[in-house]
Image (tube, helix red, strand yellow):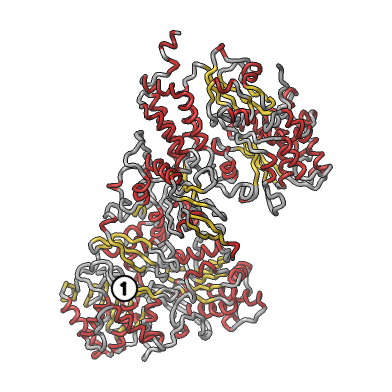
Amino acid sequence: MSQDIVNLEVNGVAVQGRKGQMIIQVTDAVNAYVPRFCYHEKLTVAANCRMCLVEVEKAPKPLPACATPINEGMKIFTKSPKAIAAQKATMEFLLINHPLDCPICDQGGECELQDLAMGFGRDAARYELDKRVVKDKSFGPLISTDMTRCIHCTRCVRFTQEIQGVQELGTIGRGEDMRISMFVEKAVDHELSGNIIDLCPVGALNSKPARFQGRSWEMTEQPLVSPHDAIGTNLAAHVRRGQLMRVVPRVNEAINETWISDRDRFSYEGVYAADRAQTPLIRRGGTLVPTTWEVALEAAALALKDAVSAYGAERIGVLGLPTATLEESYLLARLGRGLGTPNLDHRLRRRDVRDQDADPDYPGLGFPIAELDRLDGVLVVGADLRNEAPLLAHRLRTAATKNQAKVGFVNPARYEYRFPVAGYEAVAAGQMVAVLASVGRAVAEAAGQGLPPALASAVAPTEAQAAIARALTNGTRRLLLLGNLAERHPAYADLRAVAGAVAALAGATLGYLPNGGNAAGATLAGLLPHRDAGARPAPKRGLGAGAMLAAGLEAYVLFGGIEPDADTAHGAVAATALAQARFVLAITPFASDAAIAHAHVVLPIGTYAETSGTYVNVEGRWQSTTAVARAVGESRPGWKVLRALGTLMGLDGFEYGSSEDVRKELEQSMNGTGLSLDTTYRGQWLPAGAVPGVLDVVGLYASDPIVRRAPALQETPAAQRAAATSGVYP
Amino acid sequence: MSRVMNQVVFEPLHLPESWTLSAYRSIGGYEAWERILREKVTPEAVIEEVKASGLRGRGGAGFPTGLKWSFMPRNAPGAKYAVCNSDESEPGTCHDRDILRYNPHSVVEGMLIGGYAMGATAGYNYIRGEFLAEPYVRFEAAVQEAYAAGYIGSNILASGHQFELYSVAGAGAYICGEETALLESLEGKPGRPRFKPPFPANFGLYGRPTTINNTQSFASVPTILRKGAKWFAEMGVANSGGSAVFSVSGHVNKPGNYELPLGIPFLELLEDICGGMRNGKALKAVIPGGSSCPVMPAAAILSATMDYDGLRKAGSSLGTGAVIVMDEDTCMVKVLERLTRFYRAESCGQCTPCREGTGWLNRLVRRIMAGEGKKSDIDLLVDVANRIEGHTICALGDAAAWPVQSFVKHFRHEFEYMVDNGGRSIVDDPARRAA
């Protein structure tokens, strides 16, 4: 270690750095700020802006701090006259062609160029000649362009190249005519593309949906957690007078680093969709009419109690959207169990629950998200990762490109990954189990082991399958990941039993990426027909989501804005079931036809932005946030609505003071349950039977009701493609 | 006083079809390469010989060639490259073009010897795109002849040595003459200089150790090894061994490429070799080493000698040896406009001072020429140039700044005259015209 330490001086203060570090890393570490535009810690060094020039003793010229490696005994001056002169010189050059349109620029107030111009610019320009004007190109529905403002730092170019893995942007032209462009004009087409808005140090690239909507100094920044996928991406909400105006990343190296997906960034538009439920509704004479909270809550409580007494509690089904907060899912489960019904579920897209007892206590990766980067061997089964969890796909790409991880796939379709893929089997959904079994056989044969029962009938592997097996068994840190598609697979039990056997043979962790951003939270909350909170066995076993809807129960409680066609695997039976039910209670942020067509009472609730609550991600991290936006119309946070319902129905212990109380109660109830984050498969092999059903396609930007209502996202090429291919996998 | 010309890179110039293998062999071509392989001369010995010759890079910077070769991690495993820079685009410079046209085998042999000395596995000659019609063809034909004769390829002359050589045509960008931009272009990317460190000797073409030398430098090597380092060194003067090709252009009677020993007095070059000033005009200024070098007023250049130290002492540099001669009728403001226009057009646009500054400089000069200049513009010109110099990734920024600084330094009165006279040049002054 000691030979890796470099002793040097920054502005006369002795500091230490590590061999191989650049000057800027050391100066940043000791808070000796050096101005910069092109340097970004997550991107390669370009050294093209020349803003970070500093003086180094014995160097004849000022040196770029971002690209100059530190040396023993180096003496660096970041604020000497020579350094400041060089930085001011660069600033003057940057400003000569930059338009003075700050008053109408969305970046104004949060602009790196503006900020640094205050420190290094002149009061009056010495440049009196013509300024450059650059024709804009359209980057699509998400990103607005004002390329005249561009200072050519190439952060966006490097992002597309290094993070997206596809060079969508480049520089064309020379000298003053150099510009950032796409070679053929088209929308940027990547699920992380919006990050170039944050990377852009000036107003060249901005959010198109937020364009001209507000100034940065009018907004407050408050923390949020994304409900759209199971990663638990940290977001910062920009709120103006109670309205959510923008969403940007909140740095969390353990989860999302400095990135967020476009889905997380632009979904906020869905919060203000035109079909938000504004008031409680009650069905009178066949139509839903607005009413007061008192009337609606009384009616709902009464109807549910009547249903219990008239048809028995078993004839009531409770379904919750898996993007709901932990507290909402917990109270919903408590409400259902309080009524006496065991029919509770959040697994709306899962068809095969034959071996649900073998589900882990908690569907997760089995290790921290950050360790994905360091994997050596990966097999992804049934996952369109870039769609299901874009940042997880990014982590795997990092593993493959930086750690030379080998990644193989068994999927019902070929998805594009921008890294070297070690093996890919794109087979019909019905073939996935057999193909995975053959991969397992290849693993066993390579290790000279016998075949476990789940793999007993595996046919000899093809070379492609053997390549996938080699990928999985590469190195020592191995993961077999079951994705959203796997969970939706009509023969999920078989697929998982085989996956469990393959993971055991390969010494790989069996990880889950569940459908629904807070599926892990709903699982812990006990919104399940076979398990109570904290993974305790349910006092009484009930029906899962599919069975509930197929059974045609007398009453249903739908929570979270469930639109059965889009949010469940049971759209067709759901319509019949809900139409024939005597009573349907829809607790929903949205009053769309799909969400409330068969409802008798509609209770409007807030979205993720308007309620406090907790999200649990795939690594088991609990993240709580408070409401950041004012409620739309008369809607109320979901947990408060459930509290009121529970109280009205006379259920015990519904007198919570805050969502914090709800969370604390759940945490306490989990003490001593022996809850485990271990995801190892311990199920029994079920002989494969004929399993009816299909494997649904869930398009990018169709995953939950909020996302489906975000207009900009729906206009993206990815959403258009997904819409064109929606349906089921062959 | 008569000088012996054409002793090194232009040696076969007098022969018919001097570019052929037979012509080259008739002056002893490939003897050095054959001897190295036959006698198993060590790479170290080759490098020592080149160092002793005093050969310095003829591409402009004048870095000692032998020393450069010694920086290559010769014994590192894997591919290593010797790259020849034939992207000759410095305004005023045209000697590499004639070396490729009339003596291409000297470049081939020089690259073979250099590649051998540096442990390179392959060589590339990057030839400027505008040379596609003739120089490129001649060089490529020479490569094919040399392959056929067994001088290049695998198991060269049964020695077990292997070396592959390729010609590559550029696409017309001045900046690709910068060695790391050249490497980027060779890799198929836009020609933009890389920041250093890492230097090409450690991280060059395709990330492998690479050394880039100028065409004339490579072409000089076979003769050095054939006739001896001492012979070469003594041809020139101290610190400036051997000969160099001077590309003389401008207002002289006989412009052209002249290979002459370094250290020749400028006066001799002008009067004896180039036949003096055209139309008997008086000499006003000379840019002695290509457009990037500081301009020299007549008084300074007339007493200078044409070698690295001589020109440095006189306030400029030998550069590429492109001597641009300007007579008394030349408007220095217009010359600077032409030069700044060139750098504005050729800046790659990657780094800020050069991208923005070269345009600013040119616009300022144009404003002065348009009669809209202010006195303060003259100081602003120098200030902008000073703010580019030393702040850029590559030397193009410096190359754009030096002419501005030197033109204003030596010919400030011409700029002031133009500002004061609404854009009229001092050479059009009525009093001067009448005289």
Question: What residue lies at 64% left-to-right and 31% top-to-bottom?
Answer: B96
Report whether residue A144 is seen.
no
Percent coordinates x, y for residue A671 in the rendering: 39, 87
Mark 1 is surrounded, within 10 Å at the Cα level, by few (under 14), some (14 to 19) or many (20 or more) other residues, namely many
Quarter location, residue B146: top right
Quarter location, residue B413: top left
Say above or below: B360 vs A286.
above
Report whether residue A532 is seen.
yes
Percent coordinates x, y for residue A458 in the rendering: 60, 77
Q: Nearer the viewer, residue A223 or A338?
A: A223
Question: What residue lies at 50% left-to-right and 59% top-to-bottom?
Answer: A15
Quarter location, residue A135: top left
Q: Nearer the viewer, residue A63 or B203?
A: A63
- The residue that disc 1 covers is A562
Is A79 displayed left or right of A400 in the figure?
left
Is A272 displayed left or right of B66 in the figure?
left
Q: Nearer the viewer, residue B294 or A512?
A: B294
Q: Amino acid at mark 1?
A: Ile
Q: Quadrant of the N terminus of chain A?
A: bottom right
Regarding mark 1 in the picture, which secondary structure is present there? loop
Percent coordinates x, y for residue B401 in the rendering: 49, 34
Residue occupying the far front of the picture: A12
Residue occupying the far right of the picture: B39
Say above or below: B66 vs A459.
above
> What's the chain of the residue with tag 1?
A
Percent coordinates x, y for residue A231 in the rendering: 42, 70
Is A591 displayed left or right of A361 in the figure?
left
- Number of numbered discs overlaid on the protein picture: 1
